[in-house]
């Protein structure tokens, strides 16, 4: 059994406040348009559900599933798509929603993949940004919070499939 301690990083109250701020910015930026919001499974499901309910422009919803982490907290560095989107995105405004950007490889992979289908515009929205861990230069268009290195869980994020359901975000230490 792994010994684990966890410490709160963002409370549910702080999270909901920040989600409302991002949603209000997105609503302004896309005023009068319609969005196709694409969530990356599984981690983004809670953030995306909260975000689209606060956005005031109409949203179509779809999901892709990409994997780079096997188990535990170390990335394999190789991204694989295990589920593609099912919506036609040609000439539409696309917003990719992700829980966290770390090396940048996952989001860059999906951005490149979707750009091939000629959307009208394509932006990215991440709740957490581990900016210092990038392996490639990647900037998300909307960021909830920038964080230092350390493994975080809760609000959709997991450690070996545990803690996704937590409404608060924790930083965990495994020894
Ligand atoms: P990259 O490195 O491709 O990684 O930007 C993005 C994916 O890595 C996972 N990831 C985390 N998952 N706590 C997690 O639960 C973390 O601290 C963490 N850092 C990276 C996540 O699945 C994300 O989609
Ligand atoms: Mg993820």
Image (spheres, rainbow, N blue to C red):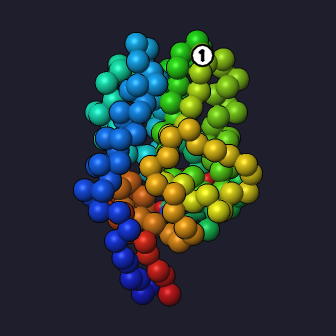
**Residue 132 percent location from the top left of the image:** 65, 62
Q: Return the residue found at the far left.
A: 13
Looking at the figure, which quarter contains the N terminus?
bottom left
**Residue 170 percent location from the top left of the image:** 38, 69
Rendered residue at 67%/31% (across/down):
113
Rendered residue at 44%/75% (across/down):
172
Label 1 C-beta lies within 8 Å of the nearest ligand 1 atom? no
Dot 1: what SS?
Answer: loop
Residue 64 visible at all: no
Rendered residue at 70%/33% (across/down):
112
Q: Which residue is mark 1?
A: 120
Q: Is residue 106 left or right of residue 14?
A: right
Rendered residue at 42%/87% (across/down):
3
**Residue 17 percent location from the top left of the image:** 29, 49
Looking at this view, is 138 or 36 the one in front? 138
**Residue 48 percent location from the top left of the image:** 38, 40
Above or below 37: residue 12: below
Q: Return the residue found at the far right.
A: 136
Residue 135: name its quadrant: bottom right
Task: Estimate how packed mark 1 is, as few (under 14), some (14 to 19) or many (20 or more) residues with alpha carbons within 10 Å.
Answer: few
Q: How many dots with numbers? A: 1
Residue 140: name its quadrant: top right
Residue 150 visible at all: yes
């Amino acid at each position: 059994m792994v010994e684990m301690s966890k410490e709160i990083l963002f409370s549910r109250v702080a999270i909901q406040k920040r989600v409302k701020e991002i949603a209000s910015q997105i609503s302004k930026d896309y005023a009068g348009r319609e969005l196709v919001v694409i969530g990356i499974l599984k981690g983004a499901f809670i953030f995306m559900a909260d975000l689209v309910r606060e956005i005031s422009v109409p949203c179509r919803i779809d999901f892709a599933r990409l994997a780079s982490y096997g188990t535990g907290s170390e990335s394999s560095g190789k991204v694989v798509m295990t589920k593609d989107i099912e919506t036609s995105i040609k000439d539409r405004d696309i917003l990719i929603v992700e829980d966290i950007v770390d090396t940048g490889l996952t989001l860059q992979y999906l951005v490149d993949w979707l750009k091939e289908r000629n959307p009208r515009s394509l932006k990215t929205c991440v709740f957490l940004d581990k900016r210092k861990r990038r392996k490639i230069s990647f900037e998300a268009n909307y960021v909830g919070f920038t964080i230092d290195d350390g493994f975080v869980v809760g609000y959709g994020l997991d450690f070996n499939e545990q803690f996704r359901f937590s409404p608060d975000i924790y930083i965990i230490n495994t020894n």
